[in-house]
Amino acid sequence: MSRDEPCIRIDPLTLRSMDTNLSSLSPQFSTTALSAEARALYQAEPDARIRLLQGLRPHICPFGDVMAQIPAGASVLDVGCGAGLFLLLLGRQAHIRDGLGFDVSVPAVEAAQRAAETSGLAETLTFQVRSIEEGMPEGHWNVVTSVDVLHHVPVSQQRSFVESLCERVPRGGRLVIKDMVARPRWRAWANQMHDLVMARQWVHQVGPEEVDGWIQAKGLSRVYRSRINSWWYGHWTLVYDRAS
Ligand SMILES: C[S@@+](CC[C@H](N)C(=O)[O-])C[C@H]1O[C@@H](n2cnc3c(N)ncnc32)[C@H](O)[C@@H]1O
C-alpha cells in the first residue's frame, strides 16, 4: 500500500469481506514505518537496484500483516528469504529471538548478510545460499515462513514444496505462508508482468483454497487468513499452528 489507507480484505475461502483495515495494525507494522526501516537497513548496500527495491518492497507487499502473525520471541526459518527483508525487519524491531533465511540467489543472500552486519543483527540472523530442491535445513525453529516464493516454484513441485514447509513445523509451532493471487486474472497478470520484468521468470500463482487443502491434509490447523490488494497486486496470507 502506498499509504496506510483502509484496505478491505476478502476472505479467500468464503469470498466474504472481512472489513479489516491495515491501519488497525500496531504502528510498528505500518507501511510507512516498515518502508523507513527497510531504507535504513539497506542504506549501506552498494547495489543500487537492491537498495531501491528493498526500500519500495513494503509498499508493494503487506509485510505488516504478515509480521503481525509472528509470535514475539520466535525462532524463525524463512524459506526463499531474498535479500532478507522480512527477517531483518523482525530483527530490527527485536520481535524475534533469532532467524535463518535461505535463498538460491547469491547476490540476494550477500545483500542480506551485509544488511545484517551493518544493522548489528549478524549475531541473531543468519543467511545462507541454498535451494528449496536441497530440502529444508536442519535446526530448531518454532516458526516457518515463506513470503512470495510459492509462485516461483514449478507447478509440479508446488504441493511437495508446501508439504516440506509443513514437515519443518514442530509441535506447538507455526507456519506462515504468503503469496500472490491467481484470481482475479488481471491481478495475477499484473504480477506475471512484474516477475517477467524483475525476475525474468514465468511464474505460476496458486489460489489459497488449494494451498489450504494441502496444508490441512498435513495436520496443521488454520488460525488466520487474509486477502489484501496493494496497487494492482493481490496478496493472500495463510497461517497455521501445529498442536503441542
Ligand atoms: C519475490 S522474491 C521474495 C523474497 C523474499 N521472501 C521477500 O519477500 O522479500 C522470491 C524469492 O524466491 C527465491 N527462490 C525462487 N526459487 C527458489 C528455489 N528453488 N530455492 C530457493 N529460493 C528460491 C528467489 O531467489 C527470490 O529471492
Image (cartoon, rainbow, N blue to C red):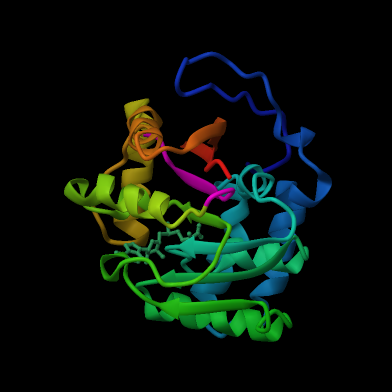
Q: Position of residue 192 (x, y in %)?
A: 31, 45
The image quadrant in which ligand 1 is located:
bottom left
> Up-down: is 180 above or below 207?
below
Q: Does 160 sit left or right of 42 as displayed?
A: left
Q: Nearer the viewer, residue 212 or 53?
A: 212
Residue 37 visible within the image: yes
Magenta region, residue range? 171-181
- As for residue 92 lying within the magenta part, the answer is no
Q: In the rendered image, which quarter contains the C terminus?
A: top right
* Residue sitting farthest toward the left: 156
> Up-down: is 166 above or below 77?
above
Q: Does 5 sit left or right of 237 as displayed?
A: right
* Residue sitting farthest toward the front: 244
Q: Does 48 sit left or right of 20 as displayed?
A: left
- As for residue 177 lying within the magenta part, the answer is yes
Q: Position of residue 86 (x, y in %)?
A: 59, 61
Q: Nearer the viewer, residue 191 or 79?
A: 79
| x 36%, y 36%: residue | 211
Q: Nearer the viewer, residue 99 or 140?
A: 140
| x 69%, y 45%: residue | 68
Q: Position of residue 91 (x, y in %)?
A: 70, 68
Q: Main secondary structure of the magenta part?
A: strand
Q: In the rendered image, which quarter contains the N terminus?
A: top right
| x 58%, y 62%: residue | 76
